[in-house]
Image (spheres, helix red, strand yellow):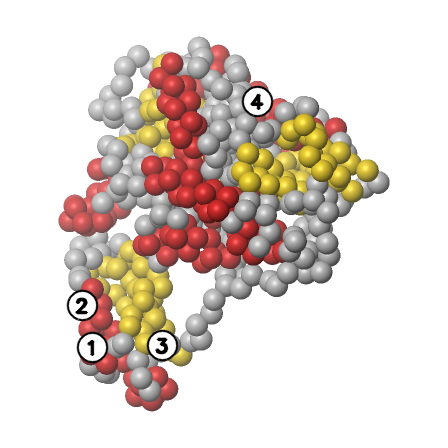
Amino acid sequence: MIRITQLKLPISHTGEDLKRKAAKLLRISPGDIRSLRIVKQSVDARKKAEILYSYTVDVEVQKESQIIKRARSGQAALVRSERYRFPLPGRERLLHPLVIIGSGPAGLFCGLMLAEAGFRPLILERGEDVDARKEKVERFWREGVLDIRTNVQFGEGGAGTFSDGKLNTLVKDPGLRNQKALEILVEHGADPEILYVQRPHVGTDVLSEVVKNMRNHITDLGGIVRFKSQVTDLVIQEGQVRAVVVNGKETIPAEQVVLAVGHSARDTFSMLFDRGIPMESKAFAVGLRIQHPQNMLNISQYGEEGAKILGPAPYKVTWKSKSGRGVYSFCMCPGGYVVDASSEPGMVAVNGMSNHDRGGVNGNSALIVTVGPGDFSGDSPLAGVEFQRRLERLAYECGQGKIPVQLYGDFKKGLCSKEFGKVEPQIKGRYRFGNLRQVLPECLSLPLMEGVEQFEGRIKGFSRYDSILAGVESRTSSPVRIGRDETLQSRVRGLYPCGEGAGYAGGITSAAMDGIRVAEMIGGRFALPE
């Protein structure tokens, strides 16, 4: 296989144009190319008057070595096709089925890999299946009726189900787990373009179907997925997990348990702390959601002509404030909505969500500021949880039970807004005006404003007066890290902290990769059940 990098074409090109460009670089006829596969596609928008697609492609031809020598191009090289491989089963015997706690990306991918290998895992999910979940979430957004077991944070697919479904990650991937995770998503209904585009996303409308298809695949292979089944306790004897307790009354024997809870499983964190599971508080970030007209973002990022072809534009901005705190955009949702992502009574938390077409009139992003253990009260491993809760209670009070919103210009002045400007709110959930300066402490509000003013220099209109803020964005990542060793187990043997809630991931893809990694560890150690 010959891999060609940095093939650049106008954004209006055709598939044949790409093939001809590859052939020209290799000094062969387009007809000599037996197959061409796009490995990566990115947008080069440094020159708004000449926006280009940049490609990495793999081409299959005869006499590859001869063609490489004749081409004499630093853009072309021979590569060996590599595929992901799951380890062969080990020899240790399992007395009871493997238990996976949580059906978010970490738990779902872990369960699917183990099921495909011949194990028959039992997945326990506190929330409901995705269809029932969508009904309850929609009712919550409409009427404010919160189900603490089934909501934007809890239920089939985890918190990522109600998001933009972004799949980019900075995690290194020598084991090809990233590629495997993307392939699994495509096999279960995601758009094949996620395999190569620079910023892949699925969209909440498609993702809800994908997770359902993955669950059905697991059950077809003999696995079991149980909803409304919250693990409320662990049975631990002599440093080894022996069983899980479900809903406070049912005990299920299990010596190998994957702990794949999400970053909002605060009651689970408390239970683990009470059971002596080693954990520590960790840094994360909090802030507010900001909404801008998507057309404004498109033109700023791509220019007038590029915006017509490339569609909803994403952005990523970062700044280090005078105080030393990092300020950055997080979970940017082109053509999306701000959503009420609360999961506890008397508290408000927000997130962002887009459908696959990203067809909304606004783009929104979390603008967040770094916080760490030094900002928390006390030295408990759960101090970060209480820090989040305090902000969410303040947001609830500020919005009188609804999402508090405020124009950015009024936020700078510390005034409660009275009416919207030209930016129309795109929000799933009930909202009302409030002064968000009463929610975020000044040590966070000031760096956030400093960042917004800096970002204006990169995206024209970013600091406009009538851009809409909503709060509070408090669930960016887990506030705890649950300890594990080189075997991926806790000090309590047989317990595998996994994914975002355990502090080992920061999004759908990295959580899925960690779930696959844990599945490999278990699958390579134990023999298949008889």
Q: How crowded is mark 4: few (under 14 residues within 10 Å), some or many (20 or more)?
A: some
Q: Residues within 10 Å of mark 3 (few under 14, many from 20)?
A: many
- Quarter residue 351 falls in: top left
Q: Do the residues labelled 3 and 1 touch (CB within 8 Å)?
A: no
At numbered mark 1, what does the secondary structure look like: helix, strand or loop?
Answer: helix
Q: How far apart are marks 2 and 3 (CA)?
A: 18 Å
Q: How far apart are marks 2 and 1 (CA)?
A: 9 Å
| Camera-nearest residue between 82 and 24 | 82
Residue corresponding to mark 3: 2
Q: How far apart are marks 4 and 3 (CA)?
A: 53 Å
Residue corresponding to mark 2: 16
Q: Do the residues labelled 2 and 1 touch (CB within 8 Å)?
A: yes
Check the image and report above or below for 412 versus 30. above
Q: Are marks 4 and 3 in contact (CB under 8 Å)?
A: no
Q: Which amino acid is tagged 3?
A: Ile
Question: Which of the two marks, 4 or 2, is nearer to us in this view?
Answer: 2
Q: Residue furthest right?
A: 238
Residue 391 position in % (x across, y down)? 53, 22
Q: Which residue lies furthest to the top in this view?
A: 400
Q: Which residue shows up at 31% across the image and 59% down it?
A: 41
Q: How far apart are marks 3 and 1 (CA)?
A: 14 Å
At numbered mark 3, what does the secondary structure look like: helix, strand or loop?
Answer: strand
Q: Which of marks 2 and 1 is nearer the N terminus?
A: 2
Q: Which residue shows up at 42% across the image and 40% down it?
A: 212
Q: Earlier in the sequence, mark 2 or mark 3?
A: 3
